[in-house]
Amino acid sequence: MGKPTNNQCEKVVIAGFGGQGIILAGKLLAQTAMKAGKHVTYMPSYGAEVRGGTSKCMVTISNDEIASPVVDTPNSVIVMNRASLEKYAPKLKKAGLLVMNCSMIDSTPQLDDSIEIVRLPAEEIAIELGNAKVANMVAIGAFLQKSGLFSPDAAADCLPDILAERYHIMIPLNKKALQKGAQFVKEKSG
């Protein structure tokens, strides 16, 4: 998969509320990049109340060393709720990518025309799969398919590395969720 090439640097912000698997999604993206031999920084952040509070994760992926884990102007933003959309979408670079969970966000933001927006019904897709908690994996699958950064299969291969052993029973469902997110993007663009 193509990006990042030469000295390109992909800066991603994933945001939502606690309990939506934001931190896990960021960890999966970082692990996938590390397994692909990239330089990676991963910086999770969440409110003290955790479940229900604000949660975000910044991931930077590069072929070169990374000076700072802080992402001020991301190339890509994945948002799972409206508050996160309002906070992080305006920070996107020109020609950036916004993946938004339209299951919980009923409006489209006014952004630069160069920004590509993927309206993804992540919750509905996850519920169809049998568990709303895999909406985060649906979103990562859609992001990976759209960005071309890594394949959803490469991310699926990293699930055992990031999930505690007691959750390994969830790996097949998480793999399906990654594939469904990717499939949604393929069908929308094909």
Image (cartoon, rainbow, N blue to C red):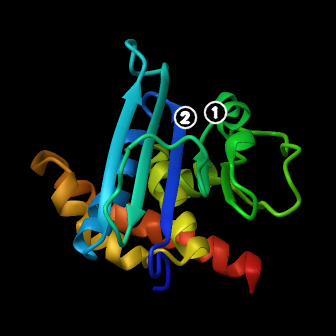
Q: Nearer the viewer, residue 144 or 122?
A: 144
Q: Mark 1 — residue?
A: 84
Q: Position of residue 105 (x, y in %)?
A: 74, 39
Which residue type does callout 2 highlight? Answer: Gly
| Residue at 38% across, 44% down | 69
Contact between labelled residues 2 and 1, with CB atoms less than 8 Å apart? yes
Q: Quadrant of residue 117?
A: bottom right
Q: Secondary structure at mark 1?
A: helix
Q: Badge 1: few (under 14), some or many (20 or more) residues near its Cα, within 10 Å?
A: many
| Residue at 53% across, 38% down | 15
Q: Quadrant of residue 181?
A: bottom right
Q: In this image, 131 relative to 145: left or right?
A: left
Which residue type does callout 1 highlight? Answer: Ser
| Residue at 65% across, 38% down | 88
Q: Is residue 169 among the parts visible in the rendering?
A: yes
Q: Secondary structure at mark 2?
A: strand
Marks 1 and 2, Cα distance to the nearest angstrom?
Answer: 6 Å
Image quadrant containing the C terminus: bottom right
Q: Nearer the viewer, residue 157 or 168?
A: 157
Residue 177: mark in rendering? none
139 w.r.t. 158: above or below: above
Q: Earlier in the sequence, mark 1 or mark 2?
A: 2
Residue 16: mark in rendering? 2
